[in-house]
Amino acid sequence: MDKIPSFQKDHDKLMPGLYMSVAANGIATFDLRFKKPNGGDYIAQPALHSIEHMLATVLRNGAHKEDIVYFGPMGCRTGFYLLTEHLGYREVLALLQEALSACLQLDSVPGSEKSECGNYLEHDLEGAKRECAAYLALLNALSAKEESAT
């Protein structure tokens, strides 16, 4: 079988950041890499689950909700995948900065009640906020670096 594009990347060289990995037919796949692959520091499962709920909710209720195709976690617990339609890298960078800021304002994890979630006992709002704050700081630094380069 052919290797899928994400397995063709050298994960020993990947660093935390935002990567546009595949763009085809108007759909772009972004890797939201919160952690260094194989670095021994992974997003704890309860925080990962909560970030999934938080960011999915914020993104699907935002100004670009019609352009969000999918948001979900990487099984390796180093980040998330975001699939968008008709949005480029800079637009997604700005969108994520706004969405992460909104996540930091949440007082609860959306969709975390028993009737709404298949594993409602495994959430960590504070852990999710710590991870989101760290990733937002990284994105802010990337954004500033890009602005100074132009």
Image (tube, grey):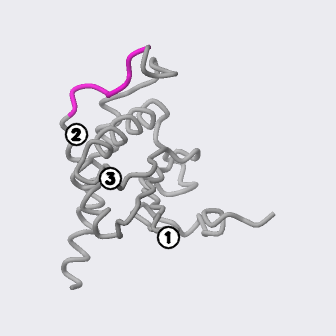
Give the overall secondary structure of the magenta segment.
loop
Name which quarter of the figure residue 128 lies in.
Answer: top left
Other residues around mark 1 within 10 Å, as few (<14) / some (14–19) / many (≥20): some
- Residue at the far right in the pictured view: 1
- Residue at the far top in the pictured view: 114
Residue occupied by mark 3: 135
In the rendered image, the vertical position of residue 84 relative to residue 100, given as above or below: below
As drawn, is 15 to the left or to the right of 86?
A: right
Q: Nearer the viewer, residue 41 or 69?
A: 69
Residue 94 drawn in magenta: no
Query: Which disc, if any, is residue 104?
Result: 2
- Cα gap from disc 2 to disc 1, whole angstroms: 29 Å
- Cα gap from disc 3 to disc 1, whole angstroms: 23 Å
Name which quarter of the figure residue 144 lies in.
Answer: bottom left
- Cα gap from disc 3 to disc 2, whole angstroms: 11 Å
Secondary structure under tag 1 reads strand
Mark 3 or 1, which is nearer the eye? Answer: 1
Q: Residue at x 29, y 55 (%)?
A: 96
Secondary structure under tag 2 reads loop
Q: Position of residue 37 (x, y in %)?
A: 54, 56
Quadrant that contains the N terminus: bottom right
Q: Position of residue 61 (x, y in %)?
A: 27, 42
The type of residue carrying mark 2 is Leu
Other residues around mark 3 within 10 Å, as few (<14) / some (14–19) / many (≥20): many
Q: Position of residue 15 (x, y in %)?
A: 46, 64
Mark 2 or 1, which is nearer the eye? Answer: 1
Q: Which residues are magenta?
A: 106-114
Q: Residue at x 63, y 67 (%)?
A: 5
The type of residue carrying mark 1 is Ala
As drawn, is 144 to the left or to the right of 10?
A: left
Name which quarter of the figure residue 108 lies in.
Answer: top left
In the rendered image, the vertical position of residue 91 relative to residue 62, given as above or below: below
